[in-house]
């Protein structure tokens, strides 16, 4: 399916001239990029290129010293990570960040926390409104369990699942927040071929069925070239490539960075 046939829309996220420093280290230097509604955008680059820092800027964990982020046409002021979640930005992490002793179902329910309207006390006592609300959240979560084909492990503590399934549950928890922009930090890292293929399929299905815009960091070039509409390449905190997968693959500066001949 081509990008055009999938109705890629107008700019959802505009990153403009972002510079991020940690003391003397410049993690990002003057980075601009635009992510359009409904696209799958991959951020690639060698280790230490600034990929995770970029995701952390997008979801409000890091605050750049220079530049501007505009989301849904609204320029952002200094924002906290939980505000990003309220705006519809969810993410997964490079190292799985789930509650290992809790069941799959309970982990997915934590993804709905931001949407809970009743108070903690009401929920603890299961008063009318809280009970109704819990049922609604349960239904949404059950739909995600079906979608990700994890029915058979819904009651299993996450820590007992194989790695690939844990990554899938983490995707599920992010989806439970019904994000419009989903940030995935190396969703296929450490997976075997079969697990990678499954994860690719789920990423494509999420994008297709829920219309979710996806920005992901990935090292596997085969995966990146297969599933992305748009690829951004970082190297030493600078952007050295930006375009369709075919264009980026043939960019001499990108080839040099990957072969280690540019520095
Ligand atoms: N919290 C931090 N404090 C200090 N330096 C940091 C911090 N986060 C990132 N950096 C530095 O910023 C640069 C970019 O790091 P970042 O983790 O964003 O790269 P990356 O492309 O995600 O790397 P990898 O592929 O290895 O995960 C590195 O030099 C890193 O040491």
Image (spheres, rainbow, N blue to C red):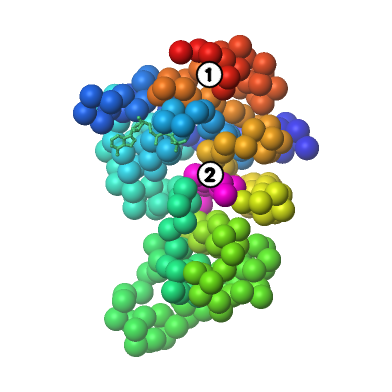
Name the side, left or right, on which 185 lies relative to 57.
right
Q: How far across and down, in percent of the image, does residue 183 sit?
A: 50, 44
Considering every residue shown, the one lying at the far right of the view is 1
Whether residues under marks 2 and 1 lie with C-beta atoms below 8 angstroms apart, the answer is no
Residue 157 belongs to magenta span: no
Compared with 78, 207 (above or below) is: below
Looking at the image, how many numbered discs can be counted on the residues? 2
Tag on residue 260?
1
Query: Residue at image x 50%, y 28%?
Result: 46
Given this view, does label 2 or label 1 mark the residue nearer the observer?
1
User: Under tag 2, what secondary structure?
Assistant: loop
- Between the C-alphas of marks 2 and 1, the distance is 22 Å
Q: Residue at x 25, y 31 (%)?
A: 22
**According to the image, label 2 marks what residue?**
186
Q: Which residues are magenta?
A: 178-190
In the image, taking residue 249 as reference, residue 20 lies left or right, namely: left
| Classed neighbour count for the residue bearing mark 2: other residues with Cα under 10 Å, few (<14), some (14–19), many (≥20) | some
* Residue at point 46%, 32% (across, down): 47
- Residue 238, x across and y down, in percent: 43, 20
Q: Is residue 209 visible?
A: no
What's the residue at 66%, 21% (across, down)? 249
Asked if ligand 1 lies within 8 A of label 2, the reply is: yes
Q: Name the residue furthest front.
A: 260
């Amino acid at each position: 399916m081509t990008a055009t046939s999938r109705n890629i829309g107008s700019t959802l996220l505009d990153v403009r001239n972002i510079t991020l420093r940690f003391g003397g280290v410049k993690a990002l230097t003057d980075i601009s990029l635009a992510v359009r509604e409904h696209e799958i955008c991959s951020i690639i680059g060698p280790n230490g290129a600034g990929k995770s820092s970029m995701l952390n800027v997008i979801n409000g964990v890091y605050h750049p010293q220079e530049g501007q982020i505009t989301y849904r046409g609204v320029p952002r002021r200094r924002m906290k990570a939980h505000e990003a979640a309220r705006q519809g930005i969810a993410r997964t992490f490079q190292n799985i960040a789930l509650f290992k002793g809790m069941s799959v179902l309970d982990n997915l329910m934590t993804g709905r926390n931001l949407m809970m309207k009743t108070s903690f006390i009401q929920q603890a006592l299961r008063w009318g409104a809280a009970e109704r609300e819990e049922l609604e959240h349960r239904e949404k979560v059950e739909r995600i369990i079906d979608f990700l084909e994890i029915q058979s492990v819904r009651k299993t503590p996450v820590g007992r699942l194989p790695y690939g399934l844990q990554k899938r549950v983490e995707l599920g928890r992010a989806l439970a927040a019904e994000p419009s922009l989903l940030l995935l930090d190396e969703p296929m890292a450490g997976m075997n071929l079969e697990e990678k293929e499954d994860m690719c399929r789920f990423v494509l299905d999420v994008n297709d069925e829920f219309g979710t815009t996806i920005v992901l960091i990935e090292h596997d070039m085969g995966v990146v070239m297969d599933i992305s509409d748009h690829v951004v390449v970082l190297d030493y905190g600078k952007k050295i490539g930006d375009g369709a997968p075919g264009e980026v693959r043939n960019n001499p500066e990108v080839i040099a960075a990957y072969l280690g001949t540019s520095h």
